[in-house]
Structure formats: structure tokens, C-alpha cells
Image (cartoon, rainbow, N blue to C red):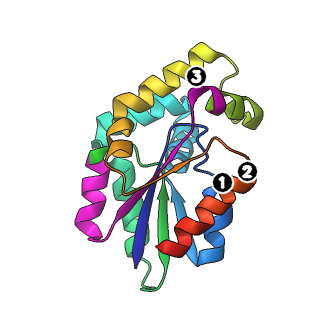
Amino acid sequence: MKVIGVCGLPGSGKSFIHQIAKEYNSTIYNMGDVIREEALKRNISIGDMAIQLRKEEGNNVVAKMIVEKIMENEDEDKLFIIEGIRSLSEVEFIKQKFNDFKILSIFASPKTRFKRLKMRNRDDDSNEFNEFKKRDERELNFGIANVIVYSDYLIINEDCLEEYKKNLKNFFKTI
């Protein structure tokens, strides 16, 4: 069983990995989806939920939930992808469960990411640059920059979609 964590700020291109990863017998778990589901249940904003969950149950709460799901699967040949790693404590927790756990970080400039988020228009995306910056600050406060710095792999996603697809396919072929 191989487990890869994916890290990147909002709009960097993490979600697109789903499309490519399917070709490589993988199952993808999205940490943000866990938070969105819980926010919906509690009827609070996604950003507030991300903070509240960590206050209530610790910084590794979402990682713990996803690790439990992965551990339920007995397919040793399966590739599992955890999208949305936010902190080194999450990385360390997951590494305790999966020795060969590696991190792939996706990087895109703030200008590029903001443009993408405006086009994506998901509930937790903003058309206001100041709100975009606040969201980045929240992510940085979780420790996402440290995860990016200590990543095993890095893909820069500033170019066209075809170039990004090519880079992702090359990554999956090498792992």
C-alpha cells in the first residue's frame, strides 16, 4: 500500500490530480471534503470549521479520520492519495502509520491561484483579493508552508493545463 500526501495553497491545482490519479489505480481522500461535510452538519463556514475542529480534537483530527478510512482497505497494491495536507504534525501522524509516506506539493503564484479560484467559484472561494489573502493566511497559520518546504516532490503549476497534466503523469510514473 502506497500513500502520497498532496499539499498546496488554494487554487494551486490539487483537485485536478483526481483526474490523472484515477489512471493509476488510486483512491483519493480530500481533507477539505471532510471539513466541508462537518461544516454543513454544523451550519458554520468552512474556514471556521477548519479552525474549530482542530481546537476540539487536535491538529491531526482530519488526518486521523482519513487514515482510518485507508486502514479499512486491504488492497496492498492500491495507491492512496490524501489531498490537502496542511501541517507537519499531520505529516508526522500519517508517517507513523505508513512508513513510505511521501508528500507532493503543488505550487502556483498568488496571481494565478486567485484567477483560478474566481473561475472555480466554489462556496469557500472569494472574488475579493483581500478575502483570498485572508484564506492564504489561515492556511499558512496551519503550517502549510512547512509542509511545502519539506515535500519529497514539487510540481510548479503556472503553465498551461497540458503541461501540468504531463508533469503529473510523469510524477505518477516515477512513484
Viewer-closest of 6 and 30: 6
The answer to whether 148 appears left or right of 126 in the picture is left
Marks 3 and 1, the one that precedes in the sequence: 3
Q: Check the image and report above or below for 128 versus 50.
A: above
Q: Secondary structure at mark 3?
A: helix
Question: Residue at the location (55% across, 29% down)?
Answer: 45
Question: Residue at the location (46% across, 86% down)?
Answer: 77
Q: CA distance from mark 1 to mark 2?
A: 5 Å
Three-letter amino acid code at disc 2?
A: Leu
* Residue 38 lies in the magenta stretch: no
Q: CA distance from mark 2 to mark 3?
A: 22 Å
Label 2 or label 3, whichever lies nearer to me, is: 2
Q: Secondary structure at mark 2?
A: helix
- State the residue position of label 2: 161
Question: Residue at the location (46% across, 85% down)?
Answer: 75
- State the residue position of label 3: 132
Three-letter amino acid code at disc 3?
A: Phe
The answer to whether 160 appears left or right of 67 in the picture is right
Q: Which residues are magenta?
A: 89-112
Residue 146, percent from left and from top: 32, 39
Residue 118, percent from left and from top: 73, 29
The answer to whether 116 appears left or right of 24 in the picture is right
Q: Quadrant location of residue 51?
A: top left
Viewer-closest of 126 and 71: 126
Label 3 or label 1, whichever lies nearer to me, is: 1
Q: CA distance from mark 3 to mark 1?
A: 23 Å
Q: Is the residue marked by circle 1 packed among few (<14), some (14-19), or many (20+) residues within 10 Å?
A: some
